[in-house]
């Protein structure tokens, strides 16, 4: 799993990305690009089976809930708030993706270590 420092770096990077993108939310038009991007990040996390990694699944669920909330806000005409909610959804989806990747790599790494140990344990002919 991610250590505390790496987790903090991921959250920090997500916050910086969110703040950097925040300047586009003051517009009156629907944040369609952010919606599309959030959906794509959610799909990517799902493809890496983020739902099978508890911490990743939590962030994946939050991303989905925020996308639903943003869609309702967009329907009611509150595009600025929808934009901010979509940035949060994007951050959660990207964190879910990173956690799913980390879990997959940790599993593959452990499998490689196990293979090496198995080979080392075999007696030489």
Image (cartoon, rainbow, N blue to C red):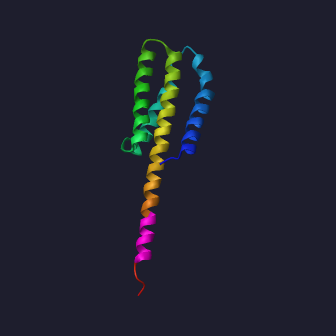
Please tell me which residue is depicted at 60% across the width and 22% down the height of the picture: 24
Q: Is residue 69 visible?
A: yes
Q: Is residue 86 magenta?
A: no
The extreme left residue here reads 52
Across and down, in percent, residue 118 comes to 40, 72
Residue situated in front as seen by the camera: 44 or 7: 7
Question: Is most of the magenta stretch helix, strand or loop?
Answer: helix
Magenta segment, which residues?
112-121
User: Residue 60, how many percent across, how many down?
Assistant: 42, 35
Q: Is residue 44 above or below residue 78?
A: below
- Residue under the image location 47 percent in, 59 percent down: 109
Q: Is residue 31 visible?
A: no
Residue 14 in the image, given as x and y percentages of width and height: 56, 34
What residue do we see at 41% from left, 35% from top?
A: 58
Residue 119 on the magenta segment: yes
Above or below for 118 versus 22? below
Q: Is residue 39 above or below residue 97?
A: above
Asked if residue 1 is positioned above or below residue 28 in the image, the reply reads below
Residue occupying image coordinates x 40% and y 27% = 65
Name the outermost residue toward the bottom: 125
């Amino acid at each position: 799993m991610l250590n505390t420092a790496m987790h903090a770096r991921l959250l920090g990077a997500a916050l910086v990305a969110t703040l950097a993108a925040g300047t586009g939310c003051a517009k009156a038009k629907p944040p369609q690009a952010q919606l599309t991007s959030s959906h794509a990040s959610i799909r990517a996390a799902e493809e890496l089976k983020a739902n099978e990694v508890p911490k990743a699944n939590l962030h994946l669920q939050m991303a989905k809930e925020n996308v639903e909330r943003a869609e309702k806000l967009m329907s009611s005409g509150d595009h600025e708030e929808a934009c901010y909610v979509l940035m949060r959804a994007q951050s959660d989806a990207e964190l879910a993706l990173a956690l799913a990747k980390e879990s997959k790599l940790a599993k593959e790494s452990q499998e490689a270590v196990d293979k090496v140990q198995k080979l080392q344990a075999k007696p030489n002919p």
